[in-house]
Image (cartoon, rainbow, N blue to C red):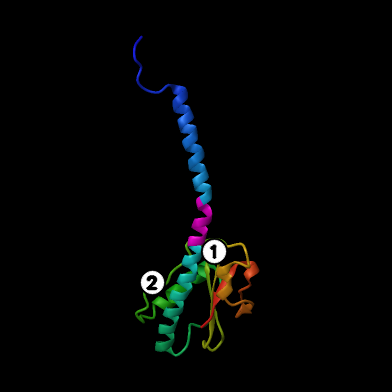
Amino acid sequence: MKNKKGFTLIEMLIVITIIAVLASLILVGMGGARQKSRDSKRVADLHNVMNALELYYSFKGHYPKGTYNSVQSWDTFVNDITKEKLSIGRIPRDPLNTGLYYYRYASNDLGTDYVLGARLEEEDPEAVIFSDDIDGTHYTIDCSDTNQVYCVMP
């Protein structure tokens, strides 16, 4: 008898099947981590935008006036702020920036106050991430935790 070296077709199929099952389990398990990562980025982005708005306020004497409550209007908001040549760097966009996930901004008529918001992927309104945001409706932005919208004000 010859001494065979290598794997049979059945052995290879079994190994490939085991690897595929493990890979799918890992990918499913990582889904929640990606959502939490995007939510953390959203919260950090809102605070960065707040810093940019304070710079805007210090130069102009008021915050940008208006309501920007859609994907397209956030792009308009970004263009309006960055065209002012106030040394404001890049204004971030939502990591997904589609459908339900976009940043929101609205101010009062005088531009003396505003609210920033972002819809989070976290589905539990009692989650820790919602413990330090504001709730209610402010300048047409619905900041309720049941809608998964995280909001901040100056």
Label 2, secondary structure: give it: loop
Along the line of sight, which residue is nearer the eye, 91 or 4? 4
Identify whether 102 is placed above or below 21: below
Highlighted range, magenta: 30-37
Residue 96 appears anywhere in the view = no
The residue that mark 1 highlights is 101
Furthest-top residue in this view:
1
Label at residue 90: 2
Splitting the image into 4 quarters, where does residue 152 fall?
bottom right
Tell me residue 57's x, y (percent). 44, 86
**Quick one: label 2 or label 1, which is nearer the N terminus?**
2
Please report the residue visible at 49 percent of the width from the left and 34 percent of the height from the top: 18
Graded by Cα atoms within 10 Å as few (under 14), some (14 to 19) or many (20 or more), the crowding at tag 2 reads: few
Please report the residue visible at 34 percent of the width from the left and 15 percent of the height from the top: 3
Residue type at tag 2: Arg
Tell me residue 84's x, y (percent). 39, 81
Q: Is residue 35 magenta?
A: yes
Residue 41 appears anywhere in the view = yes
Q: Quadrant of the N terminus?
A: top left
Left or right: 7 as drawn, with respect to 126: left
Q: Is residue 78 magenta?
A: no
Residue type at tag 1: Tyr
Left or right: 11 as drawn, with respect to 115: left
Along the line of sight, which residue is nearer the eye, 80 or 61? 61
Tell me residue 46's x, y (percent). 48, 73
The prevailing secondary structure element of the residues shown in magenta is helix
Please report the residue visible at 59 percent of the width from the left and 66 percent of the height from the top: 127
Graded by Cα atoms within 10 Å as few (under 14), some (14 to 19) or many (20 or more), the crowding at tag 1 reads: some
